Image (cartoon, helix red, strand yellow):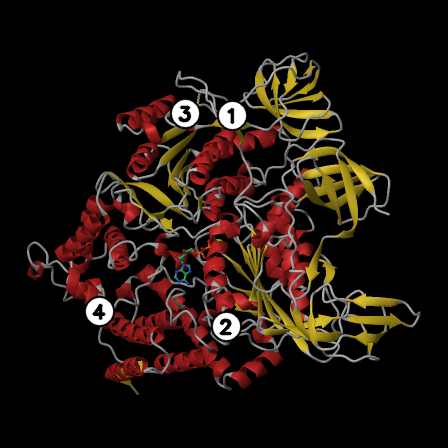
């Protein structure tokens, strides 16, 4: 970010709070940057000649005679070809020991795309992870967060996903990253030989929290540059948006704003939407896809941060540790990709929607069987088979450590149906059954008999009547 | 004389302007920012200071910038050419803007000034008229767009000249009128109206009495809305508010549909932009875009314009209503508008009400809903605005200010339940918590009986009872286990499941099932009622579910088949056979 010299210098600060300084000065513009006592600050309030600056790195130690210089422009970023492969801080300054950036200076946090100039998101993003590709298919131009408890390996999953996603550029926006996680991202991208398509903006736990507020805008301005000017497919990773929101609440509290739910500012929805809505598909092929992380506290999704996020994003991916198989999985019940119906069965094999719905339904049957078991009721043969299916399904498809093509996921699905169920029980329409059905390894003769409770057997349905989501 | 002022303070999009002259509450002003003129609205006056909310980003704005007060409130331009347009919240034509990104201060004209319209006079020279009188009409898409006398005219006026049939642009004078004092006025096809003032110009507003078909069974059958009625759809995210509203916008029995996308996802509006020019109106065969106007203020567009967007949409609705048309107005989501009010009120440091929303939020919401309704115009014709808004309760908890305030004023309540959405029982409208107050109106009951049948409402009540008893039974089973209850209870539970699966659930993405006209709803409810009225014999509870699943499957196949097609009749035949298998007298 440019720092220009030879502007008028002010040397009297009237008021200093934890996050802001107020002084009398001439003609500052709203949102404009200033340097106070060598630190970057931004104009957040002007009343007559009284200007309030938000100091990103905090006000500790700023004296009342600090030097203040106004820079005459809002936060900017230098965008050029040499930004690729670089690791930068929240101000867009190198932290990788490399040279300063060259290029055209652009304001960050610019205007939004005219909705009539957007195209409908339409291209499948393959990640190899079945919990995503099979059950919650992602599409370019989509915005979707992982909802995860802080102890889950979401950063590892994001890095993996980013490398597999066949994006032209990957922009990482790290907010409150631990230094270890920062180095993890750096090494992973380096080792994968992917530096020629990476740009990273990183605010670590060692940096002042308020600086984080600039990270999404930095990352998305960079993304817009590649998506608009170069018509590229850009994937933006934002982790952790909960820490971003926490920084928002710090600022608003320090500015004496009235908090709304969970001590978050009343503008939280707009603040988050402004970021997530940068996800876009352009008609000429360029796109920005945002994959974010929202950490939960105690799995509570009614907290203002995940709640507002859910209202904005196009679905969410729930990470959960499955204690039965000891693996992290993408929870098929609580996860949702709202855009999957645009591609599944169209850009993927015709049986995709049916295999997906059927597997989830059988998994739900297993969950019911488990509850029954826990409450001490007897299990039917069908119940036991759903449990066996669920365990195989979790291991082979739900776990995040799988790496398969969509066709392989579908084939795996059919194999498991064949291993545990009869054709009638899975209730997929005949057309597809005849084409894809795979009898189980031991043949279906060995399936546990179910004479006791015939109502557990799914009545043969023709398929169209699945509780359909977009089928 | 226009008043001028200077910027004195800036806090995000709240700007304080000092001026000497006359300034009115809600007056529009233009801030002459060096980069682009910024439109703003006065929201508080305090001595010489006017607090204005700016409809754009204030980035780079400095103290001392000139401000010009425009002498009018935020207004919309009314005239032929509004249909099929995509506007932003301030009625700028989005398609007329240049570039990919929205540019600050890029204000585009809402109507095409050059286009010629084929005008036919409806009044005559010498007629005495009042405000809102129909002077003539032009064909706009498929409707006859009435050219009305200015809505602001005081008292009686005489037409001293009126253009003959012919082609005119909106700028041409089509009539000259004169009042008793000899004051003359030229009338064109276009006029303006301030959005926050209800456009009345009707003779009276009777209670709504006609059911409005939406083609959605969970609404029309169980809790119908009326022409001129109000309703709202609260629900946690992902429960189907937007899908439901889009279905209503496609299918409802309306001449004009105005969709206000208020602070929600841009991609959802893009869906309408792309689909409506292709999809057909099931009743007229015309493209849906022909009867639709979209007001898009998506969540990334300026927050202050969010509030304006719902008022802009309502005013356009009132305009078309005054032409004697049935207008359907949809807003997704009214919570975002309330949040925009909250942001502003907090910036002005007003005393906050519950959850930091402004104290007068309930009054604002109920004033807005009261602009809907069924009206009789001065010329005896009728028109209506049916309004349905979604509400996005924080944390999915319905005990929050926006839901509570809306519940007090909207007459239909379509509560989306997380539980139903989780089990993919779409639309997730809770059949027991939801209600339509219109079912209590005698005139509505009569009109429903007239349009559907005398037995209809009785059957609906019967279905509702089965659903309630089914829910109770399911709760008992959860406690006592399947074996803990006699077989009859299982039958009761499955009868309610049958109503749920066949009547309540409806696949919004299935070509056939998505739209169920009233005659078809009648046919299906009669069929279902005939089944639930029967007694069946079972030996063990295990047999019940199996049997009813089969019935449900056949009935659903009927739902998925063209009404009374061969396939439909075949499934019904099979169904009748299965019914007889276990039916007892
Ligand atoms: N009537 C329906 N039929 C089938 N699927 C539905 C239906 N309603 C909602 N859905 C599913 O739920 C998802 C979320 O619905 P949406 O209307 O966007 O929720 P909300 O607006 O309440 O957040 C949709 O993407 C779709 O998959
Ligand atoms: Mg929605």
Q: Is residue B252 left or right of residue B35?
A: left
* Secondary element at image label 4: loop
Quadrant in which the C terminus of chain A is drawn: bottom left
Question: Residue beneath label 4, please?
Answer: A460
| Of labels 4 and 3, the one closer to you | 3
B311 vs B370, nearest the viewer: B311
Which of the labelled discs sits on residue B286, or is there none? 2
Specify few, some or many for label 1: CA neighbours under 10 Å numbering under 14, 14-19, or 20 or more.
many
Dot placed on the residue nearer the N-terminal end, 1 or 4: 1
Residue A457, can we see it?
no
Q: Residue furthest right?
A: B181
| Of labels 1 and 3, the one closer to you | 3
Question: Residue beneath label 3, please?
Answer: A82
Looking at the image, which residue is at 20% across and 55% down? A386
User: In the rendered image, which quarter is residue B208 located in?
Assistant: bottom right
Question: Residue beneath label 1, please?
Answer: A211
| Of labels 4 and 2, the one closer to you | 2
Mark 1 → mark 2, Cα distance in angstroms:
54 Å
| Of labels 1 and 4, the one closer to you | 1
* Secondary element at image label 2: loop
Specify few, some or many for label 3: CA neighbours under 10 Å numbering under 14, 14-19, or 20 or more.
some
Locate residue B54, reporting x and y percent: 68, 42
Mark 2 → mark 3, Cα distance in angstroms:
53 Å
Which of the labelled discs sits on residue B495, or is there none? none
User: In the rendered image, which quarter is residue A80 located in?
Assistant: top left
Looking at the rendered structure, the number of numbered marks drawn on it comes to 4
Locate residue B569, reporting x and y percent: 31, 83
* Chain under callout 2: B
Dot placed on the residue nearer the N-terminal end, 4 or 3: 3
Mark 1 → mark 3, Cα distance in angstroms:
24 Å
Locate residue A247, reporting x and y percent: 52, 30
């Amino acid at each position: 970010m440019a720092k220009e010299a030879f502007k008028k210098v002010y040397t009297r600060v009237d008021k200093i709070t934890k996050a802001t300084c107020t002084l009398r000065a001439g003609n500052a513009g709203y949102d404009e940057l200033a340097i106070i006592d060598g630190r970057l600050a931004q104009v957040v309030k002007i009343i007559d000649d009284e200007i309030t600056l938000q100091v990103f790195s905090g006000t500790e130690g700023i004296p009342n005679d600090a030097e203040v210089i106004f820079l005459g422009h809002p936060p900017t970023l230098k965008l050029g070809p040499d930004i690729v492969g670089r690791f930068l801080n929240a101000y867009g300054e190198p932290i990788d020991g490399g040279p300063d950036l060259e290029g055209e200076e652009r304001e960050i946090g610019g205007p939004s795309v005219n909705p009539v100039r957007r195209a409908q998101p339409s291209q499948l993003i393959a990640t190899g992870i079945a919990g995503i590709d099979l059950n919650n298919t992602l599409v370019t131009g989509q915005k979707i967060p992982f909802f995860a408890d802080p102890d889950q390996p979401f950063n590892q999953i994001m890095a993996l996903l980013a490398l597999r996603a066949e994006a032209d550029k990957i922009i990482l926006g790290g907010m409150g990253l631990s230094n270890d996680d920062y180095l993890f991202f750096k090494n992973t991208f380096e080792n994968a030989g992917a530096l020629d398509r990476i740009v990273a903006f990183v605010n670590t736990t060692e940096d002042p929290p308020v600086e984080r507020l600039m990270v999404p805008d930095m990352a998305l301005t960079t993304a817009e540059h590649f998506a608009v000017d170069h018509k590229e497919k850009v994937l933006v990773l934002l982790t952790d948006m909960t820490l971003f929101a926490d920084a928002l609440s710090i600022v608003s509290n320090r500015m004496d704003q009235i908090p709304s739910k969970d001590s978050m500012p009343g503008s939280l929805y707009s603040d988050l939407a402004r970021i997530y809505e940068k996800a876009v598909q352009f008609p000429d092929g360029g796109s920005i896809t945002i994959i974010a992380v929202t950490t939960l506290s105690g799995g509570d999704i009614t907290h203002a941060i995940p709640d507002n996020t859910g209202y904005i994003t196009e679905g969410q991916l729930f990470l959960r540790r499955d204690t039965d198989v000891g693996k992290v999985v993408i929870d098929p019940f609580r996860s949702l990709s709202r855009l999957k119906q645009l591609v599944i069965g169209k850009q993927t094999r015709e049986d995709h929607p049916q295999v997906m719905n059927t597997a989830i339904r059988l998994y739900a049957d297993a969950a019911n069987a488990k509850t029954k078991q826990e409450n001490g009721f007897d299990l039917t043969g069908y119940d036991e088979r759903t449990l066996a299916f669920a365990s195989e399904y979790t291991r082979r498809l739900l776990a995040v450590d799988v790496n398969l093509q969509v066709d392989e996921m579908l084939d795996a699905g059919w194999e498991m149906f064949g291993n545990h169920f009869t054709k009638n029980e899975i209730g997929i329409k005949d057309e597809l059954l005849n084409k894809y059905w795979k009898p189980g390894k031991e043949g279906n003769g060995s399936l546990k008999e179910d004479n006791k409770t015939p109502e557990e057997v799914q009545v043969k349905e023709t398929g169209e009547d699945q509780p359909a989501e977009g089928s | 004389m226009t008043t001028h002022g200077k910027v004195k303070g800036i806090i995000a999009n709240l700007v304080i302007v000092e001026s000497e002259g006359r300034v009115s509450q809600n007056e529009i002003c233009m801030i002459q920012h060096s980069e682009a003129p910024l439109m703003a609205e006065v929201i508080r006056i305090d001595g010489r200071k006017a607090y204005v909310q700016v409809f754009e980003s204030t980035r780079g704005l400095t103290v001392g910038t000139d401000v010009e007060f425009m002498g009018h409130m935020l207004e919309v331009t009314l005239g032929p050419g509004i249909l099929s347009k995509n506007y932003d919240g301030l009625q700028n034509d989005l398609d007329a803007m240049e570039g990919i990104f929205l540019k600050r201060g890029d204000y585009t004209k809402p109507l095409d000034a050059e286009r010629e319209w084929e005008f036919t006079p409806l009044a005559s020279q010498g007629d005495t008229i009042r405000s809102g009188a129909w002077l003539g009409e032009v064909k706009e898409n498929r409707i006859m767009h009435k050219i009305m006398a200015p809505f602001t005219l005081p008292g009686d006026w005489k037409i001293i000249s009126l253009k003959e049939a012919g082609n005119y642009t909106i700028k041409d004078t089509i009539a000259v009128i004169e009042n008793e004092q000899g004051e003359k006025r030229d009338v064109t096809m276009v006029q303006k109206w301030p959005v926050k003032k209800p456009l009345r110009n009707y003779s009276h507003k009777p209670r709504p009495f006609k059911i409005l078909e939406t083609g959605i069974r969970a609404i029309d059958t169980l809790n119908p809305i009326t022409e001129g009625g109000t309703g709202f759809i609260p629900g946690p995210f992902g429960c189907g508010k937007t899908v439901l509203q889009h279905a209503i916008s496609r299918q409802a029995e309306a001449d004009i549909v105005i969709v206000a996308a208020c602070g929600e996802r841009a991609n959802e509006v893009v869906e309408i932009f792309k689909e409506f020019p292709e999809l057909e109106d099931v009743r007229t065969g015309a493209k849906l875009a022909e009867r639709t106007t979209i007001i898009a203020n998506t969540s990334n567009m300026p927050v202050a314009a969010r509030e304006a967007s719902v008022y802009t949409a309502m005013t356009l609705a009132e305009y078309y209503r005054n032409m004697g048309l049935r207008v359907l107005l949809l807003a997704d989501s009214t919570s975002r508008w309330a949040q925009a009010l909250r942001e502003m009120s907090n910036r002005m440091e007003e005393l906050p009400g519950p959850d930091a929303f402004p104290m007068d939020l309930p009054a604002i919401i109920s004033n807005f809903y009261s602009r809907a309704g069924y009206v009789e115009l001065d010329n005896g014709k009728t028109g209506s605005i049916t309004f349905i808004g979604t509400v996005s309760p924080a944390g999915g908890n319905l005990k929050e200010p926006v839901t509570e305030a809306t519940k007090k004023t909207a007459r239909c309540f379509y509560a989306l339940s997380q539980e139903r959405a989780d089990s993919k029982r779409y639309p997730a409208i809770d059949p027991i918590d939801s209600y339509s107050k219109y079912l209590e109106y005698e005139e509505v009951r009569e009109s429903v009986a007239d349009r559907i049948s005398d037995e209809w409402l009785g059957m609906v009540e019967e279905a509702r009872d089965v659903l309630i008893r089914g829910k109770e039974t399911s709760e008992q089973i959860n406690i006592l286990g399947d074996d803990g209850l006699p077989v009859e209870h299982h039958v009761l539970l499955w009868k309610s499941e049958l109503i749920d699966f066949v009547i309540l659930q409806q696949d919004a993405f299935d070509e056939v099932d998505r739209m169920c006209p009233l005659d078809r709803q009648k046919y299906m409810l009669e069929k279902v009622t005939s089944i639930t009225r029967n007694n069946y014999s079972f030996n063990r509870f295990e047999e019940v579910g199996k049997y009813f699943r089969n019935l449900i499957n056949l009935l659903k196949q009927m739902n998925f088949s063209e009404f009374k097609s061969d396939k439909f009749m075949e499934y019904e035949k099979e169904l009748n056979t299965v019914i007889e298998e276990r039916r007892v007298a």
